Amino acid sequence: MDIIHHIAYWDSWNKPLKKQLELEHIKYKVVEGPTRKDDFISFDVSESHPYWKQISKLQKGLIGRIKYGDIPDTYFLETEIRNAEWSRLMVENVKKYPQPYATWVTNPVNYDDFCRNCGTHVQARPFLIQAETKWGYFHFFTFFWGHAIFARKMVFDAIQRNHLRGVTRMNLLIRRNGEPAKDIFQLVPANTTRGGFFLEKDIKTSRCRKCGTRKFSYHNRGIMRYKRDPLMEDADILYTQEWFGVGRKDANREVLISNRFARLILDSGWKGVRMKAVDIV
Ligand SMILES: [Zn+2]
C-alpha cells in the first residue's frame, strides 16, 4: 500500500519549493495560470518518500485554504488485492455523458427520489446513452456525471461463467431509438450492506437539511475498515449502505467486491478499473 498525495499550488506562494522538488527528484508539472501571471505547479509525492515529512510541514503554510491543495489517494499492490477478502471497485476510465446531456444534472430522468440538495437517489430506469462506444483497450468506464459502472458484454459473460453472485446486468438504451446497447451494460450490485463504515478521524460527515440523509467524505487515505456483513457470505458484490460525497451535489454508494471477483478482474486483465483493499473487521 502506498499513499500518494496529489499536490497543487501557485508558484508565487512558495518560490523555493520548485528547487527543493528538483533536488529531491520529485517531478512536477507547470501550467500557466489562466487568470493571473503566475504558474500553477502540481506534483505527486508518496508518504514513503523521504522528503514527505518536510513537504507535509511546508504545506501547512503553502496551501492555505485552497480546496485543491492536497488530495491523497491510496494504491495497493496486486498481491494485496489478491489477498484481501473484499475490495472497493473504483472506475478510472471516465468518458461520455448520460443523456439528455443538457438537462441530466438538474433532472436525471432515470432516477427516482432524487434529492437536489445532496444527490441521493434511487436508479429506477436504465441510463440513456448517445451511441455504442468504441471500447479500444478498456473493459469498464463511468460517465463524467454520476458513478455508474459500465462494462462490456464479455465481462458479464465471464461473471456468469464463474458463478459470481449478486450481480445485476442492466441495459443502457440508445437515446435515438430506445434500443438497448449491444456491448455496454451497467454493473449493479443486487444488494446493499446493512452499514458498517468506520468513522476515522479524517472522515467528515454531513446531514442533508432537505432529505435528512447522512453522507460521508470519500475515504482516500489508507485502508478502509468495514464491519463484516452477513450478506458477504452469499454475494460477490455489494453496495455500501452509506452514501459518500460530503460537500457535493452528487452522492454515491461505494461498490464492494469479493476476493473471487477481484481475482477474476486481475486474471482477465480487464482495464478501466482499480481496486482498493478493504479491511473487514
Ligand atoms: Zn438530501
Image (cartoon, grey):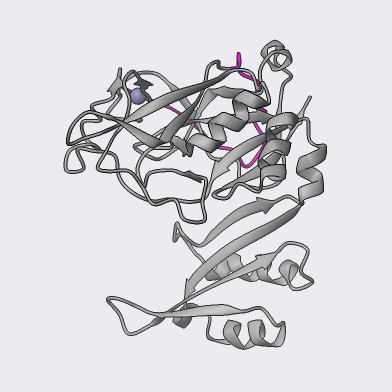
Write the start and end of the magenta stretch as one range. Answer: 193-209
In the visual, does 258 lie left or right of 171?
right
Mostly what secondary structure, the magenta segment? Answer: loop
Q: Is residue 103 toward the left or the right of residue 217 in the image?
A: left
User: Hey, which quadrant is residue 171 in on the image?
Assistant: top left
Q: Residue at x 76, y 69 (%)?
A: 49
Answer whether residue 240 is magenta in the image.
no
Spot occupied by residue 46 in the image (x, y as percentages of width and height): 70, 64
Residue under the point 72% across and 82% down: 24
Q: Residue at x 38, y 38 (%)?
A: 146
- Residue 256: percent from the left, percent from the top? 62, 29
- Whereabouts is ligand 1, in terms of quadrant? top left
Q: Nearer the viewer, residue 158 or 194?
A: 158
Q: Nearer the viewer, residue 120 or 257?
A: 257
* Of residues 38 and 29, the one drawn nearer to the viewer in this rendering: 29
- Identify which residue is drawn at 52% across, 50% down: 92
Q: Position of residue 174 (x, y in %)?
A: 25, 35
Residue 277, horizontal then vertical, whole percent: 72, 39
Q: Is residue 44 above or below residue 274?
A: below
* For residue 66, above or below residue 149: below
